[in-house]
Image (cartoon, helix red, strand yellow):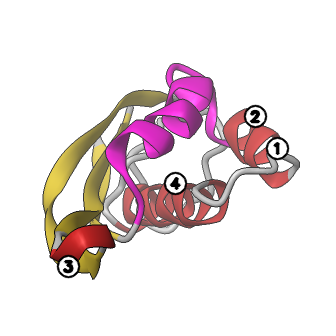
Amino acid sequence: MASATLKTHNQTPRKVRLVTDLVKGKSVPDALAVLQFLPKRAAEPIAKLIKSAAANASVNGGSISGKKGEKFDGLIIKDITVDSAGMTKRFMPRAFGRASAIRHRKSHVKVTLS
């Protein structure tokens, strides 16, 4: 089993989950093919994260034969989770001397391959 983590990605967890739900349970080549043509901003960082997890699997001996450094395309995305990583708060001036909050949400994404 191999994993990789993306910390403090500057996009809301709700929007990132739309992308991760498409690739959950697919093989690594199929997931990368789907993400390549997906017109969402989160598609590129998620693809890089899946490639990183696959590289971790090959380095750590995550292939079927157990040999290190062997390429293995049979990896499946077992679990991919998106959690909130907090937010940056700013304030925007509004009418009548008021201020309204602007919340820039961030995401933590974790991928586990098997």
97 versus 36 height, above or below: below
Type of residue at label 2?
Answer: Asp
The answer to which quarter of the image holds residue 104 is: bottom left
**Secondary structure beneath label 2:** helix
The numbered mark, 1 or 3, whose residue comes first in the sequence reads 1
Q: Give residue 103's position: percent from left, percent from top.
A: 24, 63
The crowding category of the residue bearing disc 1, from other C-alpha atoms within 10 Å (few below 14, some 14 to 19, many at least 20), is few
Mark 4 touching mark 3, by CB under 8 A?
A: no
Indicate left or right for 102 with 78 as reference: left
Q: Which residue is mark 1?
A: 33
**Secondary structure beneath label 1:** helix
Q: Which mark is residue 17?
A: none
Q: Residue at x 50, y 35 (%)?
A: 20
Type of residue at label 3?
Answer: Arg
Type of residue at label 4?
Answer: Ile
Q: Give residue 74's position: percent from left, percent from top.
A: 61, 33
Residues rendered magenta in the picture: 11-28
